[in-house]
C-alpha cells in the first residue's frame, strides 16, 4: 500500500488506516478474537497506520490494539493515540459505560488538557498498549477546551516531539474551524478531521484544508462515511449522519450520488473512500473496522480505481463542490 508522509516530520502513513474505536466495543460488543482477527487482516492487507484513544471503550481499544500489534516489528507500523480524557476509577459504577461503548463503567473520563494530564495520559496509554512509544499524539475533542489545549497540551506534546519521543503531534475533532486554528496558531503538524471532508460535507475546503496547504501541514481524514450514511451502496433511512438520524435532504443527496456512482460502474462507499485522498493536504483516510470482513471490504474499496469522468459528473450535477480537487 502507498505511503504519504506528514509534512515536516518523518512519519509516513499508509493511505488507508485502521480506526480502532470500533474494537473498543463502539455501539455493541465485539469478541476479543474478532478484534484480533480484524487487526491481523488489516496487517495482511498492508495497513500500517492504527488509530486509537483512551476514550474508545474506556481503554479496551488501546489494550486490544496493543495485544494485536505486540509481535510485529515496532519500526514497521505507526500508532496514534490521543490525550484530553484521563481514565479514573469510577466511584459509583452502575453497569455499562454511558458514552456509547459496550463496556463496564469501571472507569470514568475526566477532561484534562493540562501538561501533567497529557504526560499522565500518554503513560497510561503506553501501559495499556504495552508499546514503548507513540508515533502520533492528538489532543482529542478539545471543542470546549481551546485555551488549555493550545496553551498547555500542545506545548507539552511539542516538547516530546522535539525530544524525539513522539514523531508528530496535532488535534482530532469533528469540526474543521478549530482544527484550522490548531494548525495556524500552535505547533501542531497534523489534524485528524472527522466527517468534515466527505462526499456530503466539504466545509473543510473553507478553513483547515487551505490552511494546511499554506503552512505545509497535513490532514488525516476520518468519518468519511459520515457515521454510516455513505457506507452502503444504497443509502437507507436507518443509516446515520454525524451519529444522528439522517435528514431527508441528506438522504436524497446520498441517493443522488449513489445513482451517479452506479452509472459509472462504481459504488457510493468506494467513492467516499477515494474522494478525500484527492486533496493534496490529505495524507490518509482512516476507517473504523470491527471484523475481518469489514477490513476486506474497506481495503477493496480503497483499491478500486475511480472511473474516468465520475468527479466531473458529480461536479456538473452540483453534488460536490466545484472547488474540490479530484485529479
Ligand atoms: N474526534 C476524533 O479524533 C475522531 C472522530 C471520529 C473518528 N475518529 C477516528 O476515525 C476512525 C473512523 O471513524 P468512524 O468509525 O467514526 O467512521 P467510519 O469509518 O466512517 O465508520 C462509520 C460507520 O461506517 C460503518 N462501516 C465501516 N466500515 C464498514 C463496512 N465495511 N461495511 C459496512 N459498514 C461499515 C460502521 O459500521 P458498524 O458500526 O456497523 O461497524 C460505522 O457505523 C475511528 O475509529 C477513530 O479512530 C476520530
Image: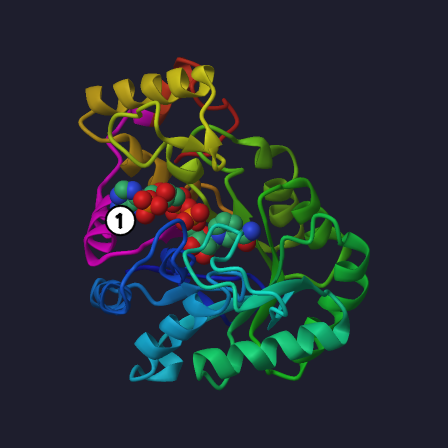
Q: Which residue is mark 1?
A: 298
Task: Specify whether 179 is left or right of 60.
Answer: right
In-front residue for pair 107/306: 107
- Local SS, label 1: helix
In-front residue for pair 4/108: 108
The answer to if 221 sits in the magenta stretch is no
Quadrant of the drawing holding the N terminus: bottom left
The relative height of residue 234 versus residue 190 in the rendered view (above or below) is: above
Task: Specify whether 17 is left or right of 86.
Answer: left
The relative height of residue 37 versus residue 100 in the rendered view (above or below) is: below
Q: Residue at x 68, y 73 (%)?
A: 118
Task: Specify whether 35 is left or right of 241.
Answer: left
The answer to if 285 sits in the magenta stretch is yes
Q: Residue at x 41, y 56 (%)?
A: 102
Residue 260, horizontal then vertical, whole percent: 28, 19
Residue 267, horizontal then vertical, whole percent: 24, 31
Q: Quadrant of residue 167?
A: bottom right
Residue range corresponding to the magenta coloring: 282-310
In this rendering, does residue 122 appear at all?
Answer: yes
In-front residue for pair 158/71: 71
Q: Quadrant of residue 75?
A: bottom left
Q: Is mark 1 within 8 Å of ligand 1?
A: yes
Q: Quadrant of residue 140?
A: bottom right
**Number of marks in the image?**
1
Residue 134, horizontal then vertical, whole percent: 51, 76
In this rendering, does residue 283 appear at all?
Answer: no
Q: Residue at x 42, y 39 (%)?
A: 227
Residue 185, horizontal then vertical, whole percent: 77, 54
In-front residue for pair 133/126: 126
* Mark 1 neighbour density, 10 Å: few (under 14) some (14–19) many (20 or more): many
Quadrant of the drawing holding the C terminus: top left
Amino acid at each position: 500500500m502507498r505511503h504519504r508522509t506528514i509534512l515536516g516530520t518523518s512519519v509516513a502513513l499508509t493511505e488507508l488506516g485502521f480506526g480502532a474505536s470500533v474494537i473498543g466495543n463502539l455501539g455493541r460488543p465485539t469478541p476479543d478474537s474478532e478484534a484480533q482477527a480484524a487487526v491481523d487482516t488489516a496487517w495482511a492487507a498492508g495497513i500500517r497506520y492504527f488509530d486509537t484513544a483512551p476514550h474508545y471503550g474506556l481503554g479496551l481499544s488501546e489494550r486490544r490494539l496493543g495485544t494485536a500489534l505486540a509481535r510485529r516489528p515496532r519500526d514497521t507500523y505507526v500508532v496514534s493515540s490521543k490525550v484530553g480524557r484521563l481514565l479514573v476509577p469510577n466511584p459509583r459504577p452502575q453497569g455499562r459505560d454511558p458514552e456509547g461503548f459496550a463496556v463496564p463503567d469501571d472507569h470514568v473520563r475526566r477532561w484534562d488538557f493540562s501538561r501533567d494530564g497529557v504526560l499522565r495520559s500518554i503513560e497510561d496509554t503506553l501501559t495499556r498498549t504495552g508499546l514503548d512509544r507513540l508515533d502520533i499524539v492528538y489532543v482529542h475533542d478539545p471543542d470546549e477546551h481551546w485555551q488549555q489545549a493550545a496553551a498547555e497540551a500542545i506545548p507539552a506534546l511539542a516538547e516530546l516531539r522535539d525530544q524525539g519521543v513522539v514523531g508528530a503531534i496535532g488535534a482530532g475533532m469533528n469540526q474543521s474551524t478549530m482544527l484550522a486554528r490548531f494548525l495556524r496558531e500552535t505547533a501542531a503538524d497534523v489534524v485528524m478531521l472527522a466527517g468534515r471532508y466527505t462526499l456530503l460535507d466539504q466545509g473543510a475546503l473553507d478553513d483547515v484544508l487551505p490552511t494546511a496547504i499554506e503552512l505545509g501541514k497535513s490532514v488525516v481524514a476520518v468519518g468519511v462515511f459520515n457515521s454510516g450514511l455513505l457506507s452502503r451502496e444504497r443509502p437507507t433511512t436507518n443509516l446515520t449522519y454525524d451519529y444522528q438520524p439522517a435528514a431527508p435532504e441528506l438522504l436524497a443527496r446520498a441517493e443522488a450520488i449513489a445513482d451517479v456512482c452506479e452509472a459509472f460502474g462504481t459504488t457510493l462507499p468506494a467513492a467516499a473512500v477515494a474522494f478525500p485522498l484527492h486533496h493534496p493536504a490529505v495524507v490518509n483516510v482512516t476507517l473504523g473496522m470491527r471484523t475481518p470482513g469489514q477490513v476486506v471490504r474497506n481495503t477493496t474499496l480503497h483499491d478500486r480505481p475511480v472511473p474516468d469522468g465520475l468527479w466531473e459528473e458529480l461536479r456538473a450535477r452540483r453534488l460536490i463542490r466545484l472547488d474540490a480537487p479530484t485529479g
